[in-house]
Amino acid sequence: MNRHTIRKPTMLRLLILCIVALASVKFLLGSQVNRDADMSVEVDEEKRVLQQRGALRWEEEWEKNNEGPGGRQVPDKPRATSQLDSSPTQFRVVHFDLKGAAPKVSYLEQIFPLLSTLGANGILLEYEDMFPFEGDLQILRSPYAYSAEDIEKIRYLAGLSNLEVIPLVQVFGHLEFALKHNKFAELREVPEYPNSLNPHTPGSQALVRSMLSQVLDKHPGTRWLHIGADEVFGLGEGLDSKNWLNSNNGDLGKMFLNHVKEVGSYVTDSHPGLGLLMWDDMMRHISVETLRESGLPNFVSPMVWRYHADLETNQIETYISSYQAAGFSNVWFASAFKGASGPAQDWTPVSYHLNNHLGWLKVINAMSRFPSIHFQGIVLTGWQRYDHFSVLCELFPVGIPSLAVCLQTLKHDGFTDEAKKQIQYFLGCKNFNLDKNLCEGGGSFPGNEVYQMVLHIRENLQNDIQKLLANNLVRGWFSRYHRKYQFGNPRNLEKFKDRLSKLLEDWESYLQNFRTHLEDIFFPDTVEEWMEENVNEYMDQLRSLATDFEAVIKRGGQPKLL
């Protein structure tokens, strides 16, 4: 047998093996593509399910609380899918003031879908000490600050609800959270006050740049950054500033603009294409010429803010006119849905905030008079503190009905009948009583338990104790004088023993349940602060009353202690 006869079968076998190998590779690649496609479908489906989870949860709760025939009366439920957006507003952004009562991420997960459903398409996150600063800035962090993973999850959850995330970093005023620390106290404009930064000290720019860099690093791809720059209290009062003003014709506005421009230039140079926003109040009295010459209009958009119920629309339009003349291309507005009617406000006056938004709608609908400046969006601020050192304003769950009213008013270009139906539907209320600022007849929004319990506490706790103290038996036989010297007649005291014991027991039990609901939403420091400011003053009085009662009873009708 010759060599060619032997080689032919061998060649054939090799050819067959190659064909089999190629087929195997094709099969494997095809399987991988199919798996990738399947995974993509699964991810999309998971995203869709997550987006709807909150809405489904509210729907289930709503159905449970509004049983229909044989149960509670069901209000007319408009179809959420039929909403028409008649608003002239491009962006409706909800502000989270995290320098007080910052919610846990688990609560934000419930809230974000609701915000989107109500008409929001963005969130403004004012972190302050809740940001996970690192390195030299780690001292700025609250003990309960979000972690880097939390920030990533917040951004992810916001994306699921189609909410654009805009971080806010203060760069001039309202820097108490940084300047309160000895490490940065030398950067204060006025040595005694931690409010504002000295713009002439080299360390000031270093601090601001470090904060900005860390925040922006945790927000890749963000389109906007808010740099604050409002209420720079004390500016011009520091020694360095006085010297600068003496050499520059006392031009305080120019000094302010120089600092903001330096900050803005740093951000836009390091992050090309990033849009900058800033509060407008410090620019309101700076001349158009000075604003234009500063170059600031080239890379910053002013955010005009006013929170009063009786909005001075003519004054607002004057500001807009000035900013248009100065060369700003875009303008934003800022209203308030809570936290703007008193530094210690614990219950949101919805009518007050509704009127604020109705005023802003007038301004928005008049923007055609300013053809050279584009209205880009409105931020609904929800202040939690007036500043870093003030007490808490209304908790976020307490402000949700007001937020719903304000968002739907913007969405429907007025507080229309359709807006009212949608508000009632999304909050799960049987009736929304605007006169009483109440969501009546249930409620199924996230945090509704806290909303209802805060209402019960503010309406009943102090009143119950005052009623007890006004009782003739207490006034006659257990007065402050009796308690001070621990004497009294046990026969008369026994007559209100049960009432005192039951009142104390009932409130202790109720407040323990309330704490549990608070702890589901907020960190321990918020729970402690709210209880101290709104509960303990009255409960301490009731507890002290019970303690004194037991002490007097034990003395068995003996003479007063001297």
Image (cartoon, rainbow, N blue to C red):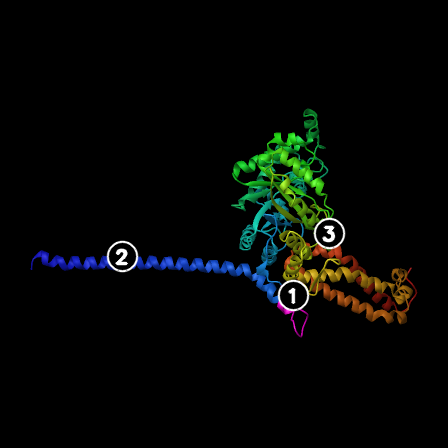
Find out whether the residues at labels 2 and 1 contact each other: C-beta distance under 8 Å.
Answer: no
Q: Amino acid at mark 2?
A: Leu
- Report the magenta residues as a range: 62-77
CA–CA distance in space, label 1 to label 3 = 26 Å
Per the image, label 2 sits on a secondary structure element best described as helix
501 vs 203, left or right, is right
Looking at the image, which is closer to me, 38 or 92?
A: 92
For mark 3, what is the residue? Answer: 352
Report the disc number at residue 22.
2
Please give the name of the residue rendered at 59% of the width and 51% of the height, measured from the top-left corner: 146
Query: Of discs 2 and 1, which sits in the foreground?
Result: 1
Residue 531 visible from this viewpoint = yes
Counting from the top left corner in percent of width and height, residue 271 is at 52, 39
Indicate whether residue 69 is drawn in magenta: yes
> In which quadrant of the rendered view does residue 23 lie?
bottom left
In primary-sequence order, the first of circles 2 and 3 is 2
Residue 348 visible, this orientation? no
Q: Amino acid at mark 3?
A: Tyr
Which residue is more in the foreground, 317 or 482? 317
Q: Quadrant of the N terminus?
A: bottom left
Determine which quarter of the picture holds residue 27: bottom left
Q: Nearer the viewer, mark 2 or mark 3?
A: 3
Label 1: how many residues lie within 10 Å, few (<14), some (14-19) or many (20+)?
Answer: few
Residue 440 counted in the magenta span: no
* The C terminus sits in image quarter: bottom right
Q: Nearer the viewer, residue 365 or 475?
A: 365
In this figure, which residue is indicated by the disc labeled 1? 76
Q: Earlier in the sequence, mark 2 or mark 1?
A: 2
